[in-house]
Image (cartoon, rainbow, N blue to C red):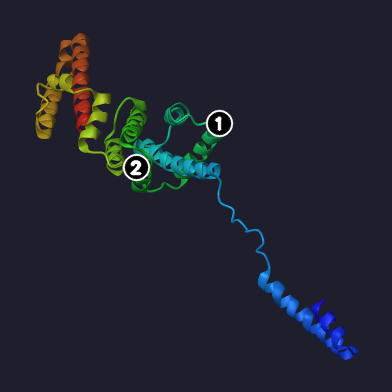
Amino acid sequence: MLGLAVGLLIGGPLPIVLLIVAGVLVGHQVDELNVLPGPAVEVPRPSRVSQDTAAQRHFARHLCALFIEVARADGELVRDEVRVVREYFAERLRYGPEALDLVRRFLKEHLARPPSLEDSAAACRDELNVPSRLLLLDALYGLALVDGQLHRAEQETLRRVAQGLGLTEEQLRSVTARHFGDGEVHYTRLGLTPDASDADVKSAFRRLAAMHHPDRVAQLGPGAVEEASRRFQEIREAYDKIRGLRGG
């Protein structure tokens, strides 16, 4: 518009056209310099719900790994062990049906391709405070004892889990004692006190087991054999309980 006005004042068609073109160019430059910024484009971020879901999946995956390692320590995974794992997630962690389906999938994956126990224990340690770690270890002990006894391989696995969770020896013993008691009655059955050494415990067991073996009283009849068998079983159980209490 300014270019047209000046051109009319000067007069002549050529100046008018040239000034109009110049005005258009200048006006375009002014518009470019003074253009208002458009609305900012916001980069989408993951929602809090999606973040929580991802964290839950990560945590469940590593928890399943620990349960699988303890369950398979003494052999194949059995139905009662699967029940214990399901109860832990359903009752203690309050997982719903959808989350439990995810747990079953993780268990199958870990059975096919066992993960690193140390890595999974470390991941759970980062997510849980000490009381929660103790509850987890307690649940793993319950899983190991589902068949009524704690095998050496299970003891070693539980000890590795406890170390990976950052628990002290005292904390490990506190969980062990919950399942095996303070061991006093078991030491008494072997004629020992709780301060006996591991060598003393093994020596006492071997001596008493040989003394009360049912074969040694077979000549006395069925009654004597039955009584010797009962005593022999008590000695065997006492020895196993003490080993379990000591984690050995």
Q: Which SS class for mark 2? A: helix
Q: Nearer the viewer, residue 4 or 177?
A: 4
Q: Quadrant of the N terminus?
A: bottom right
Mark 2 crowd level (few <14, some 14–19, many ≥20, 10 Å Cα): many
Residue 107 located left or right of residue 11: left
Quadrant of residue 140 within the rendered picture: top left
Mark carried by residue 175? none
Q: In which quadrant of the rendered view does residue 144 lie?
A: top left
Query: Can residue 143 be seen from the camera position used here?
Result: yes
Q: Rounded to the nearest whole Å, what is the CA distance between mark 1 and mark 2?
A: 26 Å
For label 1, count other residues whose C-alpha is less than 10 Å away and answer few (under 14), some (14-19) or many (20+).
few
Q: Secondary structure at mark 1?
A: helix
Q: Nearer the viewer, mark 1 or mark 2?
A: 2
Q: Nearer the viewer, residue 2 or 111?
A: 2
Which residue does the image show at 45% across and 42% down from the upper left?
61
Question: Is residue 55 placed above or below 196 in the rendered structure?
Answer: below
Locate residue 2, reporting x and y percent: 80, 78
The type of residue carrying mark 1 is Pro
Find residue 193 and report its horizontal and vertical position in percent. Answer: 9, 24
Q: Amino acid at mark 2?
A: Arg
Residue corresponding to mark 2? 125
x then y, percent, for residue 13:
90, 89
Image position of 108 (left or right of 134): right
Q: Position of residue 155 (x, y in %)?
A: 27, 36
Q: Residue furthest right?
A: 13
The residue singled out by tag 1 in the image is 97
Q: Earlier in the sequence, mark 1 or mark 2?
A: 1
Residue in the foreground of this view, choosing between 80 and 233: 80
